[in-house]
Amino acid sequence: MSGLLDALRGKLTAPAPGGVRLDGYLALEDYGALGDGRSVALSGADGSIDWWCVPNLDSPPLFDRLLDPKEGGRFVVTPIDSFTVERRYLPDSNVLETVFTTATGSAKLTESMNSGTAGRLPWAELARRVDGLTGSVSFRMEMRPGRRADGASPYHSTIGKHAVFHVGSVLGLLLHSEGIVVSRTDEAVTAEFAVASGQRRIVAIVAGEDEPLVVPTIDRIDERIDTSDAEWRAWSDRVEHGGPRRAAFIRSVLALKLLLFSPSGAIAAAATTSLPEGIGGHKNYDYRYAWVRDAGYTIKAFLAAGAQAEAKAAFSWLLKRLAEHGARVCYTLDGAVVPGLREIEVPGYRRSTPVQVGNAATDQHQHGIYGDIFETAARFVACGNILDASSAELLSHLADQCADAWRKKDAGIWELEESQHYTMSKVSCWQALARAVELADEGQLPTTCRERWSRERDRIAGWIEEHCWSEAKQAFVFYPDSDRLDASLALMVRFGFDSRERLEKTLDAIDAELGAGPYHYRYSDVAAEEGCFLACTFWMVEARALLGQRDRAEQSLAAITRALDRGVGVMSEMADPRSGAFLGNLPQGLSHLAHVMALDVLAAEDEC
């Protein structure tokens, strides 16, 4: 039976050619991401937008074909005849370009979640421009709103001279150029049109929720595609990173920018929900929330890129949530407590169920939150910034809390059901108190409890050295008296844990036991349940570079870069090491920010 399951898993994860659907599903690496600072849409290589939550990133989806290939909502602009496809983002931009080539000609599809010269628009505007390049290409267009797992029944109404679609409290318009004749039902709007060389057609959606709706002209929407591209390029021009990998660095920073929820400053972990970490498995989680861990790491990535405004907004938001709700693992994008798990009845990506929204991590405790928030504060200050009195008081209380709590078991960085004395959790507590002492010495925090923080920091370090090192494994292990490994321990190098020889041996053990080609699994004995975790590989690259192992870091980076060269630069959470197929939610902030930090370390070494 296990052989049959392995064969089935291999079949289901094998990628189809670009733009080709397997049982109705596109490979995850075939999606590009569009965003406007409020929501993210996923556009497939066959011209189908299969995911878009309106108006916010964590709203119910207007298009959800990603999780329901037959009945799900979608916005399709695809050639009628067989085609080949080439895709790319425009340079230094989140505007996406797809060139379709058929037997009769070629045409270019340019897609944008539009913004204006003053920033994000006060409505959602998803624009798609089709330009004829050679010959003539016939297209099929379909706009089919989703049914919210049968929780809403879409319909159309006529308001003034406009045909308006409604899904629950969301209303919107499908706007299009002259020359496109549409047919409407309550369920869908469809059309067929052709573009010859030199011709242009525009189709777009403007939408909102319980609010008056602006009806822009097609010409203005068309102009805003170019405006949006210019705004992305202007933002990228200010990114502070030089060297031969600047384009790759910017691509990941642009992906992180899509996850910054501009109405509040929160940073979402990913733009999707329920995409499986292993095809057919049960690890199908909702990542459209702000984790302290992911937000903290992303803030550091923004600071590394010189994006001070984004870093400050996200850091301020995070501190306010900690003050409001206490040290929780994650929060909603508008700052509330994340709801618990709830199942929805849709087929799921490649039939992987249950499909869940909400997140069980909301009720966990993870010591990692202490290290994450203090490392973020330290990096913020290291860039020449200062903490206010209220934030300093909050951080001091958190340091006191950490000094008391570190001896307890927790759920660990990987949010596991079994509470344990996870080594990484103890490292995070050491990290928090180490940074608290440094901030106090710099005058950023009150020094009242500075000596206590210092003593507890040293106690934790001693405890880790005594209880978490395995002579048999020649590595720091997952938790005391275990022979299992944890790839996140590569972060001990970044955090400055003072045990160089043991850290080098730990990295070697992680490579030997958790490595799978260019990838790494998160921890021991997890290969049967999920793919390899992309961030872990970038953490290993960063750690090798920081330890002076430049050649090994470069080799690992080159290998993982080749393995991930499968789409337009949007990374998922995981990948199947056998087929290379992407797994898990996307764009995955942790993958992109780990990539950014690895490139930043290598670039800093180039400058030395």
Image (tube, helix red, strand yellow):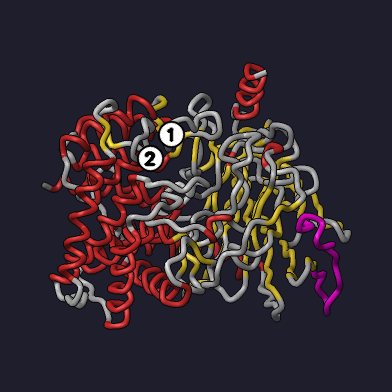
- The residue segment tinted magenta is 144-164
Count of numbered circles in the view: 2
Which residue is identified by label 1? 521
Residue 554 in view (yes/no):
no
- Quick one: SS at disc 2? helix
> Which disc number belongs to residue 346?
none
Question: Would you say residue 521 sits in the magenta stretch?
Answer: no
The numbered disc on residue 536 is: 2
Q: Position of residue 503 (x, y in %)?
A: 22, 37
Q: Residue 95 in the image: x percent, y percent?
A: 51, 55
Establish if 530 lies above or below 441.
above
Please give left or right for residue 490 compared with residue 9 in the image: left
Question: x%, y% of residue 69?
Answer: 74, 43
Q: Amino acid at mark 1?
A: Tyr
The one of 75 and 28 positioned closer to us in this rendering: 28
Question: Magenta span has 154?
Answer: yes
Residue occupying image coordinates x 33% and y 69%: 398
